[in-house]
Image (cartoon, grey):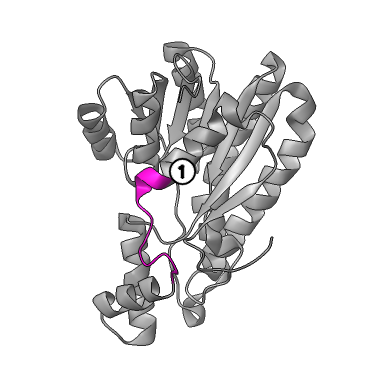
């Protein structure tokens, strides 16, 4: 199926590992012109060698000016951004007794503002041009509260509202905005979360993994490539009437209507 992504300029934040890497790889396979951003120079170097043809740069998206500078560099190098995929930033898993106001602020910086600092300048440029797509990879922790992910889940919930609100605001200007909420996915980030789960429950990480998978009706975690496939669809012309939604991908672990 031709998704109509050939030649499109795509920016993937957090595109050097995990779901973001899988997204970048999939867009490249579709013939898109892809840029990835990571705050780690080491990860950027690895991405350049692992993703032939990618344009990669290091920037800390928690910093508003660094984010703007990175976007400017991408557009100078590749042209106007047609698709923005946000997959950067992760809030630290924290046991409830260890939460503080500072922990909540850190979580908002790590997840919410790393997305907002990319979305704000890009969506306004897209609106001025009359077209564009933003896909936010957020997380089901914004819908289902977890004891070790309260601060990060709050950031995820805020991003879901932003997704819907901005989709409504910019639809008339040709911009679509949607989100994917992955559940447990085979990534380093989820592995770190399982370690926090294990510590809270006083069990081994392997037992925490077994228990978590047992709660997934499909019987396994998602692969990053499966999340990437959904992102590509939302970014494509095949999803031309889909906007303002947050789609859960958790293997039916949370049987909810909304």
Q: Residue furthest front?
A: 1
User: Where are the magenta residues, as a range?
Assistant: 216-226
**Residue 80 in the figure: left or right of residue 13:** right
Q: Main secondary structure of the magenta part?
A: loop
Q: Quadrant of the C terminus?
A: bottom right
- Does 151 sit above or below residue 189? below
Q: Position of residue 34 (x, y in %)?
A: 40, 23
Compared across the picture, whether 227 is left or right of 135 comes to left
Nearer to us in this view, 153 or 167: 167
Q: Position of residue 178 (x, y in %)?
A: 62, 40
- Secondary element type, mark 1: loop
Image point (65%, 54%), residue name: 158
Image-quadrant location for residue 121: top right
Q: Is residue 221 magenta?
A: yes
Residue 236 seen from this side: yes
User: As displayed, is residue 33 above or below residue 229?
Assistant: above
Which residue is denoted by mark 1 in the rendering? 87
Residue 241: quarter of image: top right
For residue 86, say whether it is visible.
no
């Amino acid at each position: 199926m031709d998704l109509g992504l050939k030649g499109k300029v795509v920016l993937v934040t957090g595109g050097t590992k995990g779901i973001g890497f899988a997204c970048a790889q999939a867009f490249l396979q579709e013939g898109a012109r892809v840029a990835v951003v990571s705050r780690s120079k080491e990860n950027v170097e690895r991405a350049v060698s692992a993703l032939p043809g990618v344009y990669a740069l290091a920037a800390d998206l928690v910093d508003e000016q660094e984010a703007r500078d990175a976007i400017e560099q991408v557009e100078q190098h590749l042209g106007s951004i047609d698709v923005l995929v946000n997959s950067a930033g992760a809030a630290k898993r924290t046991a409830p007794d260890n939460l503080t106001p500072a922990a909540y602020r850190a979580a908002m910086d790590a997840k919410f503002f790393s997305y907002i600092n990319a979305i704000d300048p890009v969506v306004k440029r897209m609106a001025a041009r009359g077209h564009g797509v933003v896909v936010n990879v957020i997380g089901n922790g914004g819908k289902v509260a977890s004891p070790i992910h309260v601060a990060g889940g709050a950031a995820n919930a805020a991003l879901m509202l932003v997704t819907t609100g901005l989709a409504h605001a910019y639809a008339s200007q040709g911009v679509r905005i949607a989100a994917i909420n992955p559940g447990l996915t085979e990534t380093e980030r989820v592995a770190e979360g399982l370690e926090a789960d294990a510590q809270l429950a006083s069990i081994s990480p392997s037992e925490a993994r077994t228990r978590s998978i047992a709660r997934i009706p499909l019987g396994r975690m998602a692969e990053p490539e499966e999340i990437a496939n959904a992102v590509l669809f939302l970014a494509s012309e095949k999803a031309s009437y889909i906007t303002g939604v947050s789609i859960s991908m958790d293997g039916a672990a949370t049987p909810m209507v909304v």
